Amino acid sequence: MVSKFKTLALIAAILILVPIIAGFETMQNQGSKNTIQVACVGDSLTEGSEYPLDLWMLLGNNYTVRAFGHGGTTVSINATPYMDEEVFKQALQSQPDIVIIMLGTNDALPSFHIYNSNFVNDYLTLIGEFQKLQSKPQVWLVLPPPVLHNGTGLSTEFFDQYVIPNIEEVANKTNLPTINLYVTLASHPECFPDGVHPDSEGSQLIAQEVYKALTSKQVQSNFS
């Protein structure tokens, strides 16, 4: 009898998960040309979280959201650069209308601190590649969630004192809009079990903040 109940529970779980997984694959691979194309660019905060899927569910059928994240990658070209990954080429090839860039967290690894002097220029190079696209996308810069403790090997102090100010400098130089997760998620340490990566609730909070930015009146007027 116990075995039968376990089997029924497993079947129920599969029935719940299948449409979610199918929806995510649709989001990734089958975006309609008639929808607004959103590219979520980033490291493991994008690749390893549910935020792109949560964002897609919030935005609805007028948008196609694709995740172009690669764990462990950096802004710094001399470290483990995002721009060296195949997923970067795929993001460019998607010809997005909107690009959400959430990078910089891995640049806080102590072994990468020596490359900090090039961070701003390297970020400008990354942005420039998207701005060259025929689709002329809106580019949004995300101030990533805080490094809440050093459990993953990242330096909280370096992230606070250098990475965040560097991203703000890039935003000022380019006059691009920002989404400040660094401030808004600082009060939710419970959503980041290892101090860096969001759980399901944390992913939803990220998606909600991005959604608020993308659905502002100013942004919507550009697509009307």
Image: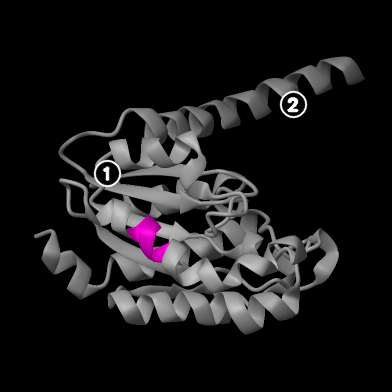
Name the front one of labels 2 and 1.
1
Q: Quadrant of residue 147?
A: bottom right
Q: CA distance from mark 2 to mark 1?
A: 31 Å
Residue drawn 52% across the image and 63% down it: 206
> Residue 14: within the magenta?
no
Please provide percent x and percent y for residue 2: 90, 20
> In the rendered image of this protein, does residue 175 appear above or below residue 23?
below
Amino acid, disc 2: Ala
Secondary structure of the residue carrying tag 2 is: helix
Q: Quadrant of residue 158?
A: bottom right
Residue drawn 52% across the image and 59% down it: 75
> Quarter of the image containing the N terminus?
top right
Please provide percent x and percent y for residue 104: 56, 64
In this rendering, does residue 143 appear at all?
Answer: no
- Which residue is identified by label 2? 9
Q: Residues within 10 Å of mark 2 (few under 14, many from 20)?
A: few
Q: Nearer the viewer, residue 167 or 12?
A: 167
Q: How many marks?
A: 2
- Which residue is identified by label 1? 61
Q: Which residues are magenta?
A: 123-127
> In the rendered image of this protein, does residue 54 appear above or below residue 162?
above
- Most common secondary structure along the magenta stretch: helix
- Compared across the picture, whether 218 is left or right of 130 comes to left
Please provide percent x and percent y for residue 124: 37, 65
- Compared across the picture, whether 215 is left or right of 27 comes to left
- Describe the colour scheme in one phrase: one colour
Residue drawn 65% across the image and 81% down it: 160
In this rendering, does residue 122 appear at all?
Answer: yes
Secondary structure of the residue carrying tag 1 is: loop
Name the residue furthest left. Answer: 224
Give the label on residue 165, or none. Answer: none
